[in-house]
Amino acid sequence: MKTLFSAILMVVFAVGIHAQSRWESAKKMASQNKELILLNFSGSDWCIPCIKLHKIIIETDEFKKLEIENIAVYINADFPRNKKNQLSPELKKENAALADQYNKKGLFPYTLLLNSEGKILKSWEGLPSENALAFTKEVRDIKENQNK
């Protein structure tokens, strides 16, 4: 019984640490690697422009290169509506806190490019007009200008 209780306690503690520190760890990683942070607010199961944004930009190889090449750390603050897609309470809380800080108007999709301290460098309201290549080039250009 003690072992079961200990295992449950460890799982709860581990989940709490991960969910609580996602934003902080992104800022820390961005700071250490001189990266930017891409924060995207989406409604993954109800917002058609959000779904399109993920399909035509975020899920592409071009976008994934931003993380691989230490250009940007990506965070998705998702707000699904369907019961089957609900997030953990910790993740909901963190996403709500991010929305309180960065998306007070409740825009979806809403994408922000931030520096490692959380200062907004660029924002995209709605579905960006650029394709994945143009979007990632813009992010790369902003990062290059930050390093000057």
Image (cartoon, rainbow, N blue to C red):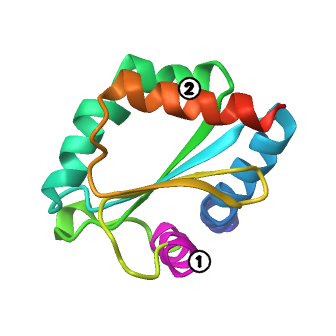
Against 127, residue 12 (above or below) is below
Question: Residue 40: which quarter of the image?
Answer: bottom left
Q: How many marks on residues?
A: 2
Question: Residue 19: which quarter of the image?
Answer: bottom right
Q: Quick one: SS at disc 1? A: helix
Q: Quadrant of the N terminus?
A: bottom right
Q: Quick one: SS at disc 2? A: helix
Question: Residue 15: which quarter of the image?
Answer: bottom right
Q: Report which residue position mark 1 lands on.
A: 101
The reply to whether residue 14 is visible in this rendering is: no
Range of magenta residues: 91-102
Q: Tell me residue 21's x, y (percent).
A: 70, 60
Q: Residue at x 64, y 68 (%)?
A: 5
Against 26, residue 90 (above or below) is below
Q: Residue at x 69, y 25 (%)?
A: 70
Q: Quadrant of the C terminus?
A: top right
